[in-house]
Image (cartoon, rainbow, N blue to C red):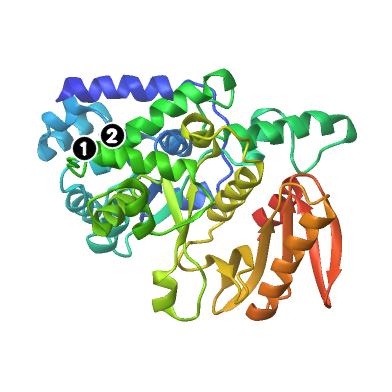
Amino acid sequence: MKTIILNQRKERDELLSRPYLTRRINQDTEMLLDSHLIKLITGPRRVGKSTQALLMLRDRNFAYLNFDSQQLLDAWDANLVMRMLDDVYSGYEYLLLDEVQNLDAWDLWVSELYRQGKNLVITGSNAKMLSSEMATALTGKYLKVEMLPFSLEEFFDWNKLDLRMLNPEQQADASALMDDYMRNGGYPEVVASRQLTRTYLDTLFDSIVWKDVAKRHNVRNVTDLNDLALYLVSNFCNPLSASELTDELGFSSVNTTKKYMDYLHEPYLFYYLPRYNNKLKIMKKAPRKVYVVDNGFVAAKAFSLSDNLGRLLENQVFVELLRNGYDPDRTMFYYRSRNDKEVDFVLRKGTHIDQLVQVCYDLSSPKTEKREVDSLTECAEELNCSNLVIVTNNEERTIEKDGLRIEVMPMSKWIVPLAQQ
């Protein structure tokens, strides 16, 4: 066991020696570390959770255990591990547990460490396991930091541009970067090596489906699970119901489809946005719109020959809303009016609807403008909301219609006030 921990210490030190981009997170890291509550860093695989934990602890004395190691899991002995940590990391102040959900009954062990006064930072990549287990054994004992792939702002940071302070000479480069980000996403491993995007994300997608989902849940019919994942990524931003998917894919039952959809959400791969309705029963029955955590997965896996620029922009808007704390089922929905007009995002604060957001890549055609504005204003009237925005690729203006004022904003400018909320 001591050899395993020593080898992991070498791994930790090698990781700490690398240069990294400082991520923009909403929480103050000093305040987080000063708290004796457990620091939970969660999100999809390969988005930089471990890196963020290491950067938070870089100047502190901390011990490290990586549970993505089968060697550690096979040799697991909790008491022996703690003795060896004291030996290898003399006087450590913090304990970093990386991908801790791979350890059986991890929540009970972590709860015990917390009672012993250990200052813990833990990372994990499974939404359901973390939320359910943290909510039982560890209720009220943790602070959560949720991480996603690089935001557009972070992508600009990586490319040495400030999205908030672009001068005229940088506009051409900025437009190219925004298009690149919309098409290829923000996974840290590929932002500096775009030629690897499709190969890397193709492999990562398959690994999530086969390792994080099929293996964890002992799925027997992995072909059906994989077919569903490919169908969802190819039909992102579309409203889909479990019964429609069951018929389309020839699955055995609607319950199996629902179960597989839940499984594919657990590793933060897909999200499902409900249709807004004041009556919960009606809302639960309506089709949900499907979004994927990163646009790069669309480029890597979708079986579509078209660019889908409108849907790519909509998916990007969804992920940015997610990044800024909006939660499907609670504060973020889509809506369809009585006349079947649709608005992409209904944002709720408390009990009232705060804003309606429509997404349209190119609003320059009068016919397109009329369609989008009519949909937005009709939904605004039914929902009694006057805070209206249309997010575009690069257009900026104001539209007045039926006494309502609609702000048309390019994605690059819409993000900035969103981040300041």
Q: Is residue 139 left or right of residue 282?
A: left
Residue visible at 58% across and 27% down?
191
Which quarter of the figure has residue 174?
top right
Q: Please name the amino acid that badge 1 sits on.
A: Lys
Neighbor class of circle 1 (other Cα within 10 Å; few <14, some 14-19, many 20+) is few
Is 196 situated above or below 298?
above
Q: Mark 2 touching mark 1, by CB under 8 A? A: yes
The number of numbered badges drawn on the structure is: 2
**Of 180 and 377, which appears nearest the observer?**
377
Q: Earlier in the sequence, mark 2 or mark 1?
A: 2
Name the secondary structure under disc 2.
Answer: helix
Percent across and percent down for residue 333 are 53, 65
Label ID, residue 215: 1
| Quadrant housing the C terminus | bottom right
Query: Which three-letter amino acid code belongs to the residue tagged 2?
Result: Trp
- Against 287, residue 11 (above or below) is above
- The residue identified by callout 2 is 210
**Can you give x and y, in whole percent of width and height, for residue 226 in the image?**
32, 38
- Image-based side of 181 in relation to 143, left or right: right
